[in-house]
Image: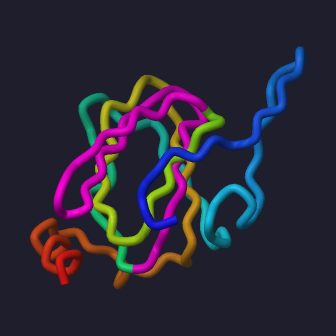
Amino acid sequence: MKAPQIIQLPKILDDRGNLSFLENQAQIPFEIKRVHWIYDVPGGVHRGAHAYRENQELVVALSGSFDVVIDDGKEQKSFHLNRSYYGLYLPKYTWRVMENFSTNSLALVLSSTDYDTDDYIFDYEQFKKEVMQ
């Protein structure tokens, strides 16, 4: 997978409650190296505003909802995440901003690499230079 896209995760329906799951390289095109989650985001605050040189991610709204605005250096697109059985795949060199978090929202982020500060691009102009090369 090279383009950002929504991936439908397995969903097992049950009267006792539904279940969804992820397995390494089964639903997503990378091995999971790191997992983090974002929660208790104050109203009006955004998260992200960066891209990665190598890291790929899958973002899932486990609870509540939020928007992920992505940019490939040419155009922007917005995804509204509000179901725990959909994940947004973000390949490397995808600028992302997460915003409009609902009350009690919980964002799960699965990453293809270990944490590395050198992999981050925090300056949008630098991102555009690198992505256009």
Give the side of residue 70 with respect to residue 110, left or right.
left
Q: What stretch is highlighted in magenta?
A: 54-83
Q: Where is residue 94 in the image (x, y as percent from the top left)?
A: 33, 63
Question: In which image quadrant can residue 33 be found?
Answer: bottom right
**Residue appearing at x 71%, y 66% in the figure:** 25
**Residue appearing at x 30%, y 29% in the figure:** 43
Kindly give the residue lying farthest to the left in the view shown.
125
Q: Position of residue 126 (x, y in %)?
A: 14, 76
Q: Quick check: 87 above or below 85?
A: below
Marks counted in the figure total 0
Q: Where is residue 133 in the image (x, y as percent from the top left)?
A: 19, 84
Q: Position of residue 3 (x, y in %)?
A: 42, 60
Seen from the viewer's position, the closer of residues 4 and 16 is 4
**Residue appearing at x 89%, y 15% in the figure:** 15
Question: In which image quadrant can residue 84 be found?
Answer: top right
**Residue appearing at x 68%, y 43% in the figure:** 9
